[in-house]
Image (spheres, grey):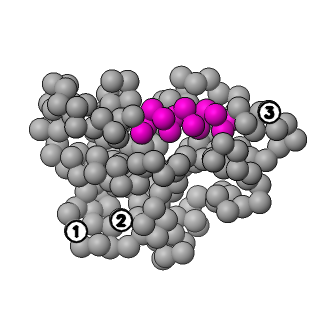
């Protein structure tokens, strides 16, 4: 763990993907329960979310030429670099996973191996970048519409390059969330 991982881990306590509370189903890490069919159903939801995300990423050139998206990107040019981060961290990587319940968060977009790259500034955390990201999501007991809103929220953290925990969302985050919502429902 880097010093930034340690900082984030002190702020947000949860079981990471290597924990023994998880089991692989359909290629996704889900909470291991006594109900194998529920575990598989949860993995299938993650797979469906991942399919939508990968569809966005594979068609990003077409989607970013839609007038509503062009307007956002022209207004805040840094969002273009944020979309590059989205492609880097979430393109066919199975970067989605179920999160354990009752930890105080519905979802976490966790950046691993954060360091200062000195490259183009994006968002509040500027040139800090993660080596990888995993998005942990609450799935069980939630509607698909609710889960879609959650993943849009968590993906927005990638686009605005949030790598250090903070309790408030920045203006960068709010702009990224508008963009991701438009892309998700395109």
Q: Is residue 60 left or right of residue 8?
A: left
Quadrant location, the N terminus? bottom right
Query: For residue 64: magenta?
Result: no
Q: Are marks 2 and 1 in contact (CB under 8 Å)?
A: yes
Q: Residues within 10 Å of mark 1 (few under 14, many from 20)?
A: few
Q: Residues within 10 Å of mark 3 (few under 14, many from 20)?
A: few
For residue 177, above or below residue 24: above
For residue 144, above or below residue 14: above
Q: Earlier in the sequence, mark 2 or mark 3?
A: 3
SS type, badge 2:
strand
Residue that mark 1 sits on: 119
Q: Residue at x 38, y 73 (%)?
A: 115
Q: Residue at x 36, y 55 (%)?
A: 88
Q: Of discs 2 and 3, which sits in the foreground?
A: 3
Q: Residue furthest left?
A: 74
Choose top left, top right, bottom left or bottom right for residue 119: bottom left
Q: Earlier in the sequence, mark 3 or mark 1?
A: 3
Q: CA distance from mark 3 to mark 1?
A: 46 Å
Q: Is residue 130 left or right of residue 182?
A: right
Residue that mark 3 sits on: 37
The magenta segment is 42-54
Q: Residues within 10 Å of mark 2 (few under 14, many from 20)?
A: many
Quadrant location, the C terminus? top left
Looking at the image, can residue 156 be seen?
yes
Query: For residue 46: magenta?
Result: yes
Q: Residue at x 36, y 35 (%)?
A: 56
Identify the mark at residue 129; answer none if there is no mark: 2
Whole-percent x and y of residue 136?
Answer: 58, 48
């Amino acid at each position: 763990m880097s010093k930034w991982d340690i900082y984030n881990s002190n702020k947000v306590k949860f079981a990471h993907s290597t924990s023994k509370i998880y089991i692989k189903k359909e290629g996704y890490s889900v909470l291991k329960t006594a109900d194998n069919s529920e575990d598989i159903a949860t993995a299938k939801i993650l797979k469906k979310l991942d399919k939508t995300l990968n569809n966005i990423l594979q068609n990003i050139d077409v989607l970013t030429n839609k007038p509503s998206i062009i307007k956002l990107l022209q207004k805040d040019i840094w969002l273009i670099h944020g979309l590059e981060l989205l492609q880097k961290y979430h393109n066919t990587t199975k970067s989605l996973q179920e999160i354990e319940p009752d930890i105080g968060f519905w979802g976490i977009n966790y950046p691993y191996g954060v360091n200062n790259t000195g490259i183009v500034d994006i968002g509040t955390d500027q040139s800090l970048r993660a080596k990888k990201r995993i998005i942990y999501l609450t799935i069980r007991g939630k509607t698909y519409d609710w889960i879609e809103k959650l993943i849009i929220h968590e993906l927005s953290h990638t686009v605005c390059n949030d790598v250090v925990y903070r309790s408030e969302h920045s203006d960068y985050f709010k702009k990224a969330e508008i963009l991701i919502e438009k892309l998700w429902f395109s």
